[in-house]
Image (spheres, helix red, strand yellow):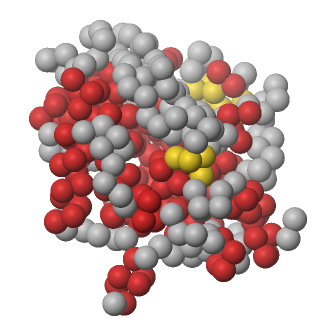
Amino acid sequence: MDTTQSLSPDTAVQIDPLPWLLELDTDNPGVRFFALTDLLNRPENDPEVRQARRQIMQTGPVPVILGQQAAEGYWVKAGGGYSPKYQGTSWSLLILAELGADPADERVQRAGNYVLDHSLAASGAFAYNQKPVPSGAVHCLNGNMVFALTRLGFGSDPRLQAPIDWLARAILGQAPIKFYQSGTSGPGFACAVNMGQPCAWGANKAIRALIELPASERTPLIERALAAGAKFLLSRDPLVADYPFTEQVSLAWFKLGFPLSYWSDVLETLSNLVALGFGGDPRLNRAIAWLLEKQDEQGRWKMQNHLNRKMWIDIEGGGRPSKWITLRALRMLKQTEIHRPASSQEEQG
């Protein structure tokens, strides 16, 4: 494979799918919102952006999910919120964040407050137990919750600082962190679920969460944790993904999905590393070329991995061109400068 040719700006996207992402879509209104803000660099107070945010709260999956919320702010049952998967409180909150729910909405605020009040263990970390305990803390859950709560407007909440600190200290193995055989079992993303070995899924979730924090709010501890995360992810070719594991690499790694839940994939790995400044690193070339080859003749990417029939509502269909996957890909490619959507033309015009 000639990766130099594959990564040429002229061959990356033969037909620009951006107009497709900008369509009014009552099933997936969040795509238009993120296309405007992330791909076209429109500010939050832009009239079209504000209209797109309103549509998220009125049509598509978000109002369906919020319609299942209990008055107290949880979903399904009170308590920690990890169970049941994909419909419980933690999962509903994560999916709302992925879909672009409005942080100012009272129901969203109620959900975030409920999670911060009921899902943290004594260690300050989020735990998967119904009654959270320190031994139930894992990187994937903490990464997902820190990401979701930051995106939903809780980034400056004092209650969120403890799990942020836990993430960084757990990555680095820095005191006063403690490790447990039933959860995070050692520094460098070691996890009991991965037979005590470093978990690339957990690494990606933790890194994405810390990247979501504004650069001005990243302490030296967080910066060191991000550097350690990048070193771990770059220790293997993302297209091979032979990170430590006692069994074969999960096929989910090579199937592009949305929302990703606790698992990860090649594209999330690329997105994290590119966001950390490794967009021009030749170690990513094979994975980026692989991603570009997955485009169809319209420049779109298909949904290969999904949670349909498990969430409160299905999000797009499997095996078909996906606006959410295409959005994910273009976000990453924009940062590599392989693909510049029409934003540059708008700003110059």
| Res. 131 in view | yes
Outermost residue toward the bottom?
A: 349
- In this image, 22 relative to 316: left or right? left
The residue shown at (16%, 31%) is 107
Q: Nearer the viewer, residue 166 or 255?
A: 255
x, y (%) of residue 231? Answer: 68, 55
x, y (%) of residue 3? Answer: 80, 69
The residue shown at (17%, 35%) is 109
x, y (%) of residue 86? Answer: 44, 22
Identify the image quadrant of residue 234: bottom right
The C terminus - image quarter: bottom left
The residue shown at (44%, 34%) is 315
Outermost residue toward the front?
A: 297
Q: Nearer the viewer, residue 18 or 1?
A: 18
- In this image, 71 relative to 196: left or right? left
x, y (%) of residue 40? Answer: 37, 70
Identify the image quadrant of residue 44: bottom left
Identify the image quadrant of residue 149: top left
- In this image, 274 relative to 103: left or right? right
